[in-house]
Structure formats: C-alpha cells, structure tokens
Image (cartoon, helix red, strand yellow):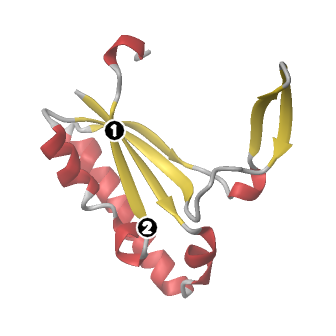
Amino acid sequence: MQYMLMCCIDEALWNGLPDGERDAVMNDYNALIQEMVTSGHYRGGARLQSVDSATTLREQSGKVVTLDGPFAESREQLGGFHVVECRDLDEALGLARRIPPLRVGGSVEVRPVDPAYRL
C-alpha cells in the first residue's frame, strides 16, 4: 500500500534556526531518503518552495478566483511530501517517525493513497 507523508513546519521557525542546525537536519533528511530508496520504500516526493510562492484557487459566486499565497488556517506550512510503499500503516508510521524536521518542531501527516485514483 502507498502512503503519503506530508511534512509541515512553521516557516518562520525553520528560517529562525541556526544555519548549522538546518544543515544538519537536511543532511539527515537526505540520508533517510537515500535509505528509503535503497530499501525500496520510496516512490517519489519533493521539497516545496516557500509559501510566498504559492497561488491558491477558490470558487466564489460560481467563478474561480486566483489568490496569491496560501490561505489554509494553519501555523504550519506544507514543506514537502513523500510517497512510500509500505506493507501497512505501522510501517509507514515507522518511516514517518524518522523524518528529521520532527525534532525541530515539524509535523508529519501520514495518509493512505487511494488506490482507485492512483496514477
């Protein structure tokens, strides 16, 4: 079964970390990704650019309106995502627990990918 690991963190918190701490987190992150590739769990993913580059679409009065920026009601922003192949939720949670930004205040939402709509 495939699971999406959605990695979120408050960008202000992340940007406020000392460079050395951010570099250490990202080095550990890259090592984890390589381990997941080697183990066959990793199916894909990406780091997203800052929320400042986001564009949001909403429908208002029957028309689609384009807005600059993210407008989710959240202090955390989606920073990246990974799609992993796991035998069950427990295995997916085990991988998610190892995502390094957790140790600096991030969060990871784990959700099964709906096989009926998988491309």
The residue that label 1 is drawn on is 111
| Residue at position x 54%, y 84% in the image | 17
Q: Judge from the rendering whether residue 54 lies leftward or rightward of residue 104; answer left or right.
A: right
Along the line of sight, the residue nearer the viewer: 90 or 19: 90
Q: Name the mark on residue 50.
A: none
The percent coordinates of residue 66 (x first, y second) are 85, 35
Badges 1 and 2: C-beta atoms under 8 Å apart? no
**Pointer 1 local density, CA inside 10 Å: few below 14, some 14–19, many at least 20:** some
Q: Is residue 92 left or right of residue 68?
A: left
Residue at the image position 64 percent from the left and 50 percent from the top: 72
Three-letter amino acid code at disc 1?
Arg
Give the amino acid type for the residue marked by disc 2 in the picture: Gly
Question: Which of marks 2 and 1 precedes in the sequence?
Answer: 2
Residue 109 position (above or below residue 103): above
Q: How many marks?
A: 2
Circle 1 — which element? strand
Q: Residue at coordinates 13% horizontally, 45% vertically from top-left?
A: 90
Q: Is residue 76 above or below residue 13?
A: above
Q: Secondary structure at mark 2?
A: loop
Q: Residue at x 40, y 17 (%)?
A: 118
Q: Which mark is residue 106?
A: 2
Q: Closer to the camera, 30 or 119? A: 119
Quadrant of the frame with the C terminus? top left
Report which quarter residue 15 is drawn in: bottom right
Q: How far is disc 1 from disc 2 in space, using C-alphas?
A: 17 Å
Q: Position of residue 94 (x, y in %)?
A: 18, 53
